[in-house]
Each structure stands twice: as C-alpha cells, then as structure tokens.
Image: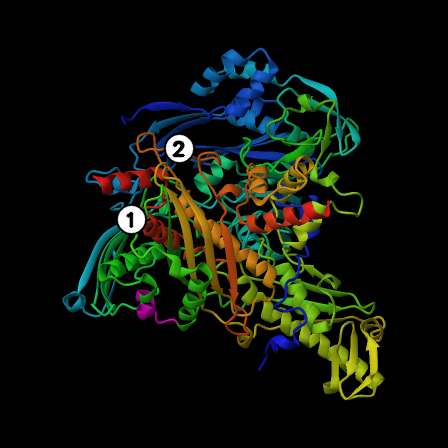
Amino acid sequence: MASWGEASESRLIGKRVTRLSGKDKVTGKAKYTFDINEPGMLYGRILRSEVAHATVMGVDMSDAEALPGVKAVIPLIEVGKKLRYQGQEIAAVAAETDDIAKDAIRLIRVDLEELPHAVTEEDAMADGAPEIRDWPSNQSEPNIREDGDLEAGFAEAAVEVEATYHTPVQTHVCLETHGHVAKWEDEQNLTVWASTQGVFGVRNDFAQRFELPANQVRVITEHMGGGFGSKFGPGVEGHTAAELSRITGKAVKLMLTRKAEHLVAGNRPSMTQHVRAGATRDGRLIAYDMKGYGTGGISSGAGFTGPYVYHVPNSRAERVNVATNAGNQRAMRAPGHPQGAFGMDSLMDELAEKLGMNPLEFRRINDPNEVRQAQYTLGAQEIGWHRRNRVPGSGTDVKKRGMGLGSGQWGGGGGRGTEARVTINADGTVEAVTGTQDIGTGVRTVIAIIVAEEFGLAPTDIRVTVGDSAPGLPSGGSGGSQTTPSVAPVIKTAAAAAKQKLFERIAPLLEAPIEDLRVGTGTIYVVSDRTKTITWKQAAGQLGMESISEGGTWDEDLRQGGAAGAQFAEVEIDTQTGAIRVIKIVAVQDCGLAINRLTTESQINGGVIMGLGQALLEERFMDAVTGRMLNANLEDYKVPGTLEIPEIKSIVFDTHRKVTGVGEPPCIPTPGAIANAVYNAIGVRIRSLPITPDKILDALAEKKA
Amino acid sequence: MPDKEKKQGTNISRRNFLKGVGTGTVAATVAPSVLISNEKTADAQMGDAVASATIQLNINEKSYQVEVEARTTLLTVLRDGMDTGGNNIDLTGAKLICDRGECGGCTVMVDGKSVYACMMLAIDAQGKQITTVEGLADGDDLHPVQEAFIQHDALMCGFCTPGFVVSSAALLNENAKPTLEEIKVGLSGNTCRCGTYPFIFDAVKTASQKM
C-alpha cells in the first residue's frame, strides 16, 4: 500500500516551504492573463445592459464601427430577444487601445423596450410578480428532505426556538477579473491565455465552440488572480474574445470591468430560512423543521445546507429556489455551507441559551464527529473560552466583549483524471509536468515538494510546469478543494516510478540490490553499506543520452476526504457607535496531511478572512425600483481590508497522513462564530448577515425599549 | 415601473469625468450629456479629449518618450504604453483592479511616495521619479520587503502583491519601525481577496527589522 511515510522520515513534506512562484510574484515578473501583451494585440470590450429586463428593439453599431482605431464590432444578442438582468451582453468591440474600445462602446445605440422586473426574492415571490423567465413560476418546486418523526420529536422537546436567519448575495470579487487573451495562430489553431480554474475544461469548451480538434487549442494559465469557484468556463466573454480575434486576425485581450465582475461573473446565492427546533432537557437536539428559500439570480439555484453537522433524529427541510432578474450564481467557496452553518450555529446557541447550557457543551452532546470534538477542546483552550460572558450582554462598559463558536465540514478527497509526468535528465535536472493550475493555493510548490522529497533534492531543484494544456497531460478543474488530493498522489507515484527506474540503472554500479538503494540529501546510497554512495548528479549521469520519464496513477490510499473544522471568535462591540471589532479568531482545521504547512496556514487565514467579510461586510445591494446593483465597485461593496483583520490563530490540525484539500472549509464556521460572539457580547441576536453597526444599534435600542 | 422605450448609454465614471476635467475645456458639459445618452454631441467632446502629446517619463531610473492623450493614466502608460521607438514598456506588475483608487493594486512610488497609478494622469507624472515594483530590486538583490513577502508567504494568487510590496516599501520609507497598528493603517489603501493580510503584517515587520 502506497503511503507518504512517517512524519519523522519526512524532510520536506509537512514542513514550511516558501512558494516557488514567490520571487516572480513579488517582483512583478509573474504574468497573468491580464498582463499578456501580444504584438499588434487589440483590446476587447463588451456593451452590457443597464436594465434588468427589456426587449431589444434595435442595436445600431455604425458609429462605433466608424470610429478610427476600431477593428470589429459584433452583436451579442439578436433584436427581438430579451435582456433578463443588468450586465447581460449586448455587443462587443475590438480596438487598437482600451480607451478607443471604451469610446466605441459608448457609440453603440440600443433601443430597448423595458419590461417589469423583480430583482429581490420578495418581489419575485409576490403575487402578480413579473415573469422572470418563460417558466411557469419564479419559484422552483420545493426540495424536501425528511428524517424521523418530526411530531414525536417536538413532543419530546423541553425547549423550542423559532427564528428566521438570512444571508444576502455575496460576490466573488476576484481581483483579476474574468478574462482572456485569444489568438488564432492560423485558421485551425487557437491559443488562449485564460484566467481560469480549469485549463482543460476551458480548452475543451473552446474546441467545441469553434469546432476545432481539442489538440489544436492551447490554453495557458501560468498565474491567475483569484477565482473562488467562479472561473470554470470561458463564458460569453471568452467566446467573444476568440470571435473578435478570429474576425480581426489579431490577438484580442478582453477582461471584464470591475462593474461587470460584480454583475455577471457569479455570486453566492442568498438564504432566508425560517426554522423551528427543539431540544430535550438533557441537551439533545431532537427536532428541526426548516423552510427556506434563496436566489441564485436568473438561474434561481440557491442550495444551502440545513440541518448542518449536528445530529438531529427528527427533521424536515424544505427549500425553494427563486429566480430574479439578476446575474447568475456560480459556485463560491464551499457552496451552500457558510450560509447553512451560520443558520445552524446561531440556532444551536439560541437553543443552548434556552436550556441554560454552555453552547460548547451543547455542541459536545450533539456533534457526532470525533475530530471536531477534539477541535472544540483545543479551540476553547486557545481562545480562553472560560473568559466568556456567563450572562450574554452583561457588563456595564461602553465596549463589550463576547465569544462564540461555529463548525464546518467539507470533503476534499480528490479524484481521478490527472495525468502527470516526472522526468530525470542525464544532467541531473528534474521536471514535473501536469495540466492542473495554480490558482493561488500553491499546488506548484506542493508538486515540487513531493518530487524533491522522493529524490532527496530541494524543491527549487524541480522545474514544475502547470497551467498549460500543450503538454497534453490533463487534470481536472480546481474546485471542491480537490486540486492537491487529485494531483499529489499522481505526482508521488510518478516520482516513485522514476526513482525506481534510476535505481535499476545504477544498482550494478553500486553493486547492490535495487531494494537496498536509498536517496539521501542529493545522494543515493546503499542502506546495507553506507560507504557506497554517489551524488544525484553522478547517478543521473549514468543515463547517457537518455532521460527517465514516468507517469503516475491516482492512488486512493494517498488521499482522504472529510475535513472537520471549528472556529472560536472573540469580538468587541462599541455599544454607542455599533462598531464591531473582531479581536481574535482561532481556526482549528482538519487538513489530513498538509504537504506544505506554510501555504496551508495561508489558506486557513484566507478562508477565515473571507468568512469575516461575509459576517460583517459583504452584501450585494439591488435596487428594487431600477433593477440595478447599487454597489458594483470596491468602494461600496466592502471586502475585508487591513483594518478589519483580527489576530488569527490558524491551527493545522493533522489527523492522518493522507492528503485532504482545504481551500474551502476554513470559510464555513466563521460567520456563525462571529454572530454568536456578537450575541455573547451584547445579549441581542442579529439573525441577518452582514452584522453591521446599524443593525447592532437597532437591536440594542429595541432591547432597551 | 411603466414600460417605456429607452435609449441606453453607459455612464461616464467619476474618474473619466475627472480625466475630462484634466483636458480643461469640456468639464462643464461632458458629464450631463454623456450621462443622459450617447447622443452625437458626445463624439465632439471625445474628439477634444483625444488630442495627444509626446512626453518624457522617468520610470525605474530610465527615461521614456511616450505619446499620450490627455486622459491617459500613468497606469495605462506603464502597462500598455509604447515608447516612441515602438517598444512596449510592458511594466505589468502594477495591476488595474478597481479602476477608481480603492484597492491599491496599481500602487507605484512617485518621488518615493506611494501613489495610485490609475488615479494619476500620465501628463502629471512628468519630471517625477517613478518606481514600479519591477524597479524595487537592485539587480538580483531583492528589496527587504520582497524577501520578507516570500519568507512569510505574504501572497497567494499574487495579483495584489505588487501593490502591497510597493506600499510596504513606501511605508517603511516614511516609518522605519512601524507598529502593527501603523502597518495596518499604512497598508489600508490596499486590498487582498485571498486573505493574505496576517502574513503581510509579519513580512513588513520582518523587513523593518532588516532595513
């Protein structure tokens, strides 16, 4: 059975290794799609709808076409068709400079016949609501899940809580907007630089779209500036870039504007859930009845979890997706989980309070997951749980502190479908190639660590190629926290196979059986006679004119799904201004075997910070009257900045020596932990995210009255 | 809202308006007319705006002759500009992220102070020393801030990193030994979405000890 070996034997795996791409990224040398400058390259821009619902009566592109410097103008919607959300594509231009493209977009005249719209869930669900799409209803059939006997459960309950929890639509805010540089090498060969989480998926999409053989489309993503689940396909903008390039015969760069990024490049759907739940006197969660809905925009899809992580024997959950005239949802970091976790962890605290029980104790009784049980102990110790307010809201100071906790659970076990190649050249150099992409999680460095560990070299000795379809070694998209658990086993087995081949070549030279050979640090030696040793370079030199190049296989024994997490938050509320300051967050995250502890910590920090944004800052504001998003920029749509960052203690909680992906789970428990800490501080519960100062002041005023 | 026929236009942004102001003559009229629609009048005003001139810029201790329009930002010159010899300047380290002076992704140093290159017109950068992230290192010797960013993993996707590196270096120019609070305030004009902040704070602290 393949294994990663014992921790005590690992020289690199599980240690803190700095990123291979670090130097390029800190010097500005790293080239993102946005940075590609091809000779003669044109700049593409898209004219988008400013209204939420309308019929296109006419598009006049003649003035745009006549503008000097404009090379192509194409319609993206037919006259007579409907625009169904702000931001939907109408036409596109390619011009010699970005400024000219911007001017040309302004010269396109569009005649629209506006239709009634509904951009909020409530408007779309109201009687007589406008028809969002040609569907029988704006609401989906309810998705219902039942377990046990709800009535019997409530009969057994000693306490009950009934509450409504809400989380708004959140947008991904990728700092590098979605975009491509497309370039036809000739009529049959297309090269695309894409800011994507899935190089091979994008390649196959372009091949299909332009009826090309897949091996005549090359997609390159050397570096990319954030995706968080929103960058899996070329989208309209990718197809448009390629079409403009085809028409003009020039490379075309087309990146979304910041505004378009908010409007059309995906979002986390909203959630509103009304829940009634009961617990027994001895603290068992016994009944859970939830009805909820959310909007994922024009496609409606808005799944969320509930009940979540805790055991409840009798439950019913009913969910409805609501279509609205707004840009479509896309997967966003742990889709469905942070919303559901916020609702569930808020509910757990409300039940615990009714029982007069410590919320931590209540979770201990109801959480069947052993890993999280251990995390509760560690996290409580780290935050100093004993210091929390016994009576929420007690204390007479203007600034009040409180503590709360939240939980999460994710998969991240990886899957088949990655091909990789590890090559040892006769001069001792080593190459590792696979078609995955480094979206900022550091998989490039993970690959180098694994190969370097196997060969007794340094990670910087390994030349790693990812983010390019040209070598013809496919790998899946980077989603579901699947990248490392999908790629690492294949790299490991490829490197092991290459090492075996090298050992076969040098065993005669060392006059030892192959199974007695071991790698040292830059050496290969005989374990039974350590005087017999040669350097790595000497060993490779035996290859003469040849190279060793081996593929790998995905070995299930090298990875494992299932990542539990628990977080504890401490906050301080200014009861006069409503200002909320997060003091500290302890994030205990199950990571399986963290190949690179340093970058794993980075990911936990990042998840916590995104969760903090969801808890306190982020909300897409739609204006019901005009149908427009009011905060489609980075000034009014708030993401966490330096001043919001608390002390974060990210604990890499190793539970086994198999690889588990961890990109998504650390963002799940944060909103619930912060919301519960706010309650513990002021004794008033905010059931709607983001928890902003105005909500705090309103709640405090209500309590006083 | 009653159904109605409507001609749609794209709004002029606040910065485009400011750029219009930079041209001197069209400020009073450009905003209202373009806001309402794409009427023909907009063309004439754009015609005014696109008058160009050749200027000289000092970037990373190198002199560049570039042809710019009045509205051309310093960031556009760095990333997409061409010198009069036809060579791309190609300093793409500074990024355009928010396009309105909110995120710091385009931060460069102008005479040693951090500036949003998306908010500065190229013509206003004449006669000043411009340092981009590409000009921070001394050959192969990285700036202490750059070294510390690598050491602490103060980056993930890396797209905001050039802006943070330059802002951090500018901060240390002004305050050699900042406290954690001073680091947070000093870098509050920069945004990261991956959530690298804690390690950025560590990196700036380390760099300050080495400088």
Residue A404 point in image, percent of width and height? 37, 56
Q: Mark 1 or mark 2: which comes first in sequence?
A: 2
Is B97 above or below relative to B150?
Answer: above
Is B53 above or below relative to B211?
Answer: above
Residue A432 point in image, percent of width and height? 69, 64
Please provide the residue range marked out in magenta. Answer: A362-369
In magenta segment, residue A363: yes
Q: Is the magenta stretch mostly helix, strand or loop?
A: helix
Render colour scheme: rainbow
Q: Decide: marks 1, 2 in contact (CB < 8 A)?
A: no
Which residue, given by chain and number where applicable, does mark 2 sit on? A630
Of residues A39 and A526, which is closer to you in this image? Answer: A526
Residue A7 point in image, percent of width and height? 61, 75
In magenta segment, residue A560: no
Q: Which amino acid does label 1 sit on?
A: Arg
Which residue, given by chain and number where applicable, does mark 1 sit on? A685
CA gap, disc 1 to disc 2?
27 Å
**Quadrant housing residue A83:** top left
Q: Are marks 1 and 2 on the same chain?
A: yes
Look at the image and tell me in which quarter the C terminus of chain A lies: top left
Q: Which amino acid does label 2 sit on?
A: Leu
Label 1 lies in what chain? A
Q: How crowded is mark 2: few (under 14 residues within 10 Å), some or many (20 or more)?
A: few
Residue A129 point in image, percent of width and height? 23, 38
Regarding residue A152, the answer to whether it shows in the image is yes
Of residues A260 and A567, which is closer to you in this image? Answer: A567
Label 1: state its secondary structure: loop
Q: Residues within 10 Å of mark 1 (few under 14, many from 20)?
A: many
Residue lying at 40% horizontally and 73% vertically, measured from the top left: A370
